[in-house]
Image (tube, coloured by chain):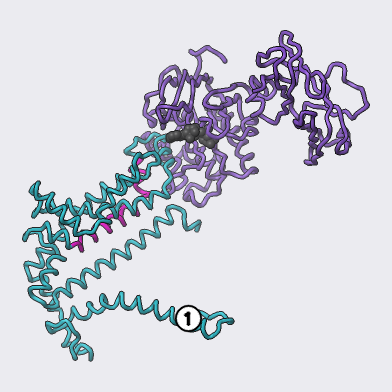
Chain colours: A cyan, B purple
Amino acid sequence: MTQLPSYYKFWHKLGHYSLKFGAWSVLFFLILPILVIIPLSFNAEPFFSFTRGMVTLDPDSYSLRWYNNIVTNDNWLLAVKNSFIIGIFSTIIATILGTLAAVGLSSQYMPFKRVIMLIILSPMIVPLIIVAAGMFFFYTKFNLAGSFAGLVIAHSALGIPFVIITITATLSGFDRTLYFAGLSSGASPVRSFVDIVVPIIRPGVISGAMFAFITSFDEVVVVLFLAGPGQRTIPRQMFSGLREQINPTILAVATLLIAISVIFLVTLEVLRQRSNRLRGLEGHN
Amino acid sequence: MNSDSESDFLRFANVQKSYDQKNLVVKDFNLNIPEGEFLTLLGPSGSGKTTVLMMMAGFESVTSGEILLKGESITRTAPYKRNIGMVFQNYALFPHMSIAENLAYPLKIRRIPKSEIKERVDRYLELIELQGFGGRPPGQLSGGQRQRVALARALIFQPSLVLMDEPLGALDKKLREQMQLEISRLHKKLGFTAIYVTHDQTEALTMSDRIAVFNNGVVQQCAAPEVLYEQPENAFVAEFIGENNFIFGVVKEIRSNVIEIEISTGEMVRARKVDDCQIGSICKVSVRPEKLFLISEGSQDGSSDNNVITGKLLLRQYVGDYIRYYFELPDEKEVVVKVLNDHTAPNIDRGQTARLLSKENDCFAFMAD
Ligand SMILES: Nc1ncnc2c1ncn2[C@@H]1O[C@H](COP(=O)(O)OP(=O)(O)OP(=O)(O)O)[C@@H](O)[C@H]1O
Ligand SMILES: [Mg+2]
């Protein structure tokens, strides 16, 4: 608890505590629906609410049956596999293309920079449902609807903006003369890029890649439009699960997704600090 | 300028550069540089110095003309094949490599054996007096130390030509002077040819064998420092290098290479003719503040073969090692006189007049624009 300044009068104090209360409530309501899912996913009963036994912490009221459900249900296993296949391939494509685009777009002399940036970032700005509908009509023409290739391409397009944004941020601190210094040391353009540019922007590349993966991993709108029965992903499976066979399996899946997200977030933060250190933002130690 | 192009190490022949296909940033740049020379490109901001250096390094294309290194055109050679060392203004040390790795990088690229790399890195660390710093990241070095590493990295693969673009621009005055000495020392010791860019003229005067003064994409004059200072070839050089007074007057008489003008005080001033002036036209005479001598009103000595200008004292400025006197002429132009702060420094009060003497050889007549 911080000490309040001694000149605070009643109204100051009231304001201070109301602000504090408000801030905590917002945080609480943001995080509670997420946290509540975790214990519920261990529910022994097929309910979405806390049973008496759970509240009294009776071990018998908890079980792993919904987790077991995931690994024994072919639909869920297929969904997990699909999610990873689509996620990984679209991440690779988005990261490579996004990195190259970010490098080009951060060049001082790139013409039409803003326009090109806007076009590439548009999937992030345009409502997803419109993007998805557009993709559906367009991809159908090329027989890409209902195929893995179609989903990978679509998710790459959705992931690229994130890659570009994170790498552009990293590159904004990148000094282009370093690349020139590589060339003047005798390294070819490719070698200079690999030896000098890539290690310095690596944290940005990795966090961009993670954003791209998460984007693909929890994307449902485009999947609803484009995926055939063979390409159901985890979110798509949850979506139909909600309507067809309501049971806490969804909660178990959600808990796993939360765990993955947290792991990703922590990794991102570690990388961000490392990148700051590399760019000398943290000073000398 | 010497035209013996065969023996020249580096030659620029009619080099032009335009970034937008319309305006020439560098116009018809010609320069011959003998091996081992320390040449400085000096010019105001935006005059195209960096552009010339970038073309030489290969980071910018040449719009027209040729750059020849040892008689061979490098105009279309890729930058990494030119074998030219480069020192950047902001050091450009690789932040993810240690000092030793930075120095080793050009050697590693050249596939030099590991043992030799180590030996050479040690030798260059010693040369820049940073033994024991090899394992540190660049972030832990001071500005001067980083610049020394950048210099060593540009020299370690023993290029015959080293380019430096305002390498000391980011350092404070004291460190800059120290580094100027350091660079000169390494140049003498290793014997590379250096092209150095600066807009600090003191730096240019003290370090260079020759200075090419640059303005508007054209070399105004390329000569040794003392020639540049003592015999400027045009008004821009006279004004840009060092401090100069410009005194305006009407041309009265022209002899082979001496011009006589009548200035606003009615006095006649003789000067060496630089530009072709017509009798009756307005022209300006440059004379350096330290080449003017102050004689208080009344005394007569030395006036016979010297130019005499009478001015009214506006301001006396005490600088320390010297004193500056600001005089005003009837046409409201100012004339500055620099006098060493010793017993000869006269005591004149504001508003008093004094006579300023100068030798004909120290005065240069240019066309007034
Ligand atoms: N890549 C570029 N694209 C377009 N114009 C450029 C580019 N680089 C330089 N210029 C222009 O060319 C001119 C000369 O620039 P240059 O950088 O060579 O000057 P400089 O003499 O090095 O100046 P300074 O002393 O400020 O470094 C300037 O007008 C500049 O705006
Ligand atoms: Mg410059």
Residue at disc 1, secondary structure? helix
Residue at coordinates 13% horizontally, 49% vertically from top-left? A138
Q: Please indicate whether residue A16 sits to the left or right of residue A81 in the image.
A: right
- Counting from the top left corner in percent of width and height, residue B84 is at 45, 30
Residue at coordinates 11% horizontally, 75% vertically from top-left? A68
Residue B164 in sight in this render: no
- Count of numbered circles in the view: 1
Relative to residue B173, is residue A251 depicted above or below? Answer: below
Residue at coordinates 68% horizontally, 14% vertically from top-left? B277
In the picture of the structure, the residue carrying the numbered disc 1 is: A15
- Counting from the top left corner in percent of width and height, residue B32 is at 52, 19
- Counting from the top left corner in percent of width and height, residue B362 is at 75, 21
**Front in this rendered view, residue A214 or A136:** A136
Q: Amino acid at mark 1?
A: Gly
Residue at coordinates 74% horizontally, 25% vertically from top-left? B247
Q: Report the magenta residues as a range.
A: A192-219
Residue B159 in sight in this render: yes
Name the dominant secondary structure of the magenta segment: helix
Magenta span contains residue A205: yes
Magenta span contains residue B104: no
**Front in this rendered view, residue B110 or B73:** B73
Subunit of label 1:
A
Relative to residue B311, is residue A87 depicted above or below? Answer: below
The quadrant in which residue B116 appears is top left
